[in-house]
Amino acid sequence: MRASVLILLAVALGAGCGRDADHEGAAPAPAVPGVATTVAATEPMRAMVRAFGQVAPSGDPTELRDARGQVAEAKAREHAAAEALRRLQALSPSVAPRKDLETAQADATAARVALERAEQTLAGFGDDAGRPPLAADEAWAIAQVVQLDLPGVAAGAEARFAADAIPGRTFAGHVDGDASYVEPATRTAPVRLRVKDPDGVLRPGMTGAVQIEVGAPRPVVVVPASAVVYDAAQPVVFVAEADGRYTPHPVRLGVAREGRVEIASGVDAGARVVTTGAASLLSATRLPAGEAD
């Protein structure tokens, strides 16, 4: 059955690829079983920023939680050093040796400097005091956005999270706040997302892929994802011609979302593209000459 289908496909393709002037008036190629088409449409789409994401136990990245812990630890040390210094200062010089007093003063100074440094680090993460708590059907996720993509990412932007542990499902959400810093070692910025999780299946630590919409919507040519097949690394879309032929068009892809793919070049709006059977058409183009006979 597959062989017969490929033969019909080869005939349909060959009608366009090998036809000469003597056959220009020939009848259209017969309809090929198992091939369905649809029209490439124009739809508004935004550009996408892609990032690594991870479900978080809170809306704070690890670095921010560490910074808060360092501030708390520095405050405790500063308080202890200051108390020790006050106790020594209350004693008479004969009871508190000068060396011990100088050591306590140095410890208090060092603790105060460490606290100031920790507070400065924490301040660099921004102030999220007004952030509302999660709803019952929400989860936190942290997207690590490359710094070059950061200018386009704004609070409120629509986002989607695809968890590695739950294939075939995406979780809609939005950017909860602007990134407040860039990690120098990775050159990425943690961007906090609120993700809808109505079934409560996301768990802290789950990793996945994040897509964030950026910029204003723009009209683009889109086709179903099933219309795109790959000839080696080259994406190809088959276009149904008026005379029954199916012509392969190398294309350049753009944004992909919800089963639709942007065609940046190679196919115009209004073209009828093959959705079901595109892979078989591609196989037919690879048949050696004469094999269809």
Image: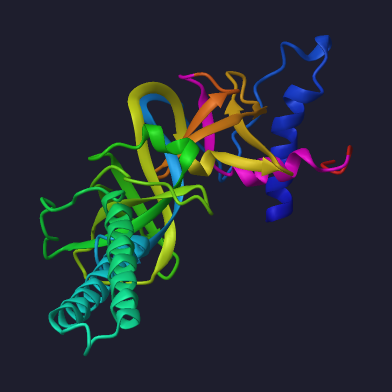
Relative to the observer, which residue lies in front, 8 or 62?
Answer: 62
Residue 193 can be seen, yes or no: yes
Q: Residue 241 placed where, x, y %?
A: 60, 21
- Examine the rendered structure and indicate whether residue 54 appears above or below residue 86: above
Relative to the observer, which residue lies in front, 48 or 9?
Answer: 48
Q: Which quadrant of the structure image shows residue 104?
A: bottom left
Give the magenta-colored segment's residue range.
Answer: 269-288
- Judged left or right of residue 80, residue 37 is right
Look at 56% across and 46% down and name the residue there: 34
- Judged left or right of residue 277, residue 69 is left
- Examine the rendered structure and indicate whether residue 1 appears above or below residue 240: below
Examine the structure image and report whether residue 272 is included in the region drawn in magenta: yes
Examine the structure image and report whether residue 103 is included in the region drawn in magenta: no
Q: Which quadrant of the structure image shows residue 99?
A: bottom left
- Examine the rendered structure and indicate whether residue 114 appears above or below residue 11: below
Q: Residue 289 placed where, x, y %?
A: 89, 37
Query: For the C terminus, which image quadrant?
Result: top right
Look at 34% across and 70% down and name the residue there: 106
Relative to the observer, which residue lies in front, 137 or 102?
Answer: 102
